[in-house]
Image (cartoon, rainbow, N blue to C red):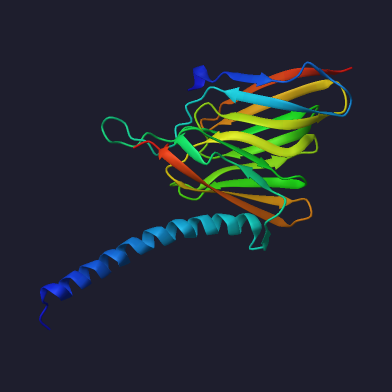
Amino acid sequence: MKLNRRDMIVLTAGASVAALLPVASSAQEAVDAIIAEFTGGAEMGAEGLTLTTPEIAENGNTVPVEVDAPGAASILVLASGNPTPKVATFTFGPMAGAQFASTRIRLAGTQDVVAIAKMQDGSFVRASREVKVTIGGCGG
Amino acid sequence: MVDTATPRVRVPRDATAGEIIEIKTLISHDMESGQRRNGDGDLIPRSIINRFTCDFNGQNVIDVAMEPAISTNPFFEFMAIVPESGTFVFTWYDDDGDVYTDSKDITVT
């Protein structure tokens, strides 16, 4: 088979798309794996967990994040676009006054922040918010 | 980081029985993520505080598993219920095995 210029362009375009896909899907797989580990594959509801983040974070090194889920036993926070997506797991004890916590996190770039609450009855609730990051916070 | 990890905690001095109070904590720590490179292009090894707990009179308030994505000088704000006078104990666990603690008394009036 003789390759002309047009075939070559099609081939290289195809190759570069194929090269990009595994990267994107492996990051998503990492997030899915962490979620599956936390929930055990259970269905997740959408009501009962409030995730508060800024819409735009100028500095990805310190982004304020708040989670609030009345009746939760623990809350997992993930940064889906970070090199290591896990951020923190808050577990509430008998002396917790509310299932609420606020902290500051690092975000590598614009991405979805995901929170999953495990309720005391064993059900799960998921919330997600996109944060636009002007300057990433993972060094390099 | 060992020498400079200084905890700072804010707890109200008194409360009424059963009141829900707000607690804020901050500890000075680099929280080296293990993602950054030094001038020679070598990775700087991870060195973070990986766990934070708060207890009131021996009962747990909150227990946080921390990953490198927590910012430098980790800050936490949370709520606790105060049924009686007692002591809040705050504990931070460093990757290098160090443990930093602070405590605050509260009086129920």
Answer above or below: position of A70 versus B32: below
Q: Nearer the viewer, residue A101 or B65?
A: A101
Q: Position of residue B39 (x, y in %)?
A: 27, 30
Q: Nearer the viewer, residue B52 or A130?
A: A130
Answer above or below: position of A57 versus A38: above
| Residue projecting furthest to the front | A55
Quadrant of res A103: top right
Q: Is residue A105 left or right of residue B53?
A: left
Q: Position of residue A14 (x, y in %)?
A: 27, 70
Measuring 74% from the left and 32% from the top, which residue is drawn there? B79
Measuring 76% from the left and 44% from the top, which residue is drawn there? A70
Q: Nearer the viewer, residue B20 or A52?
A: A52
Image quadrant holding the C terminus of chain B, namely top right
Residue A17 visible to an observer of this rendering: yes
Q: Position of residue B19 (x, y in %)?
A: 84, 28
Q: Position of residue B63 (x, y in %)?
A: 68, 37
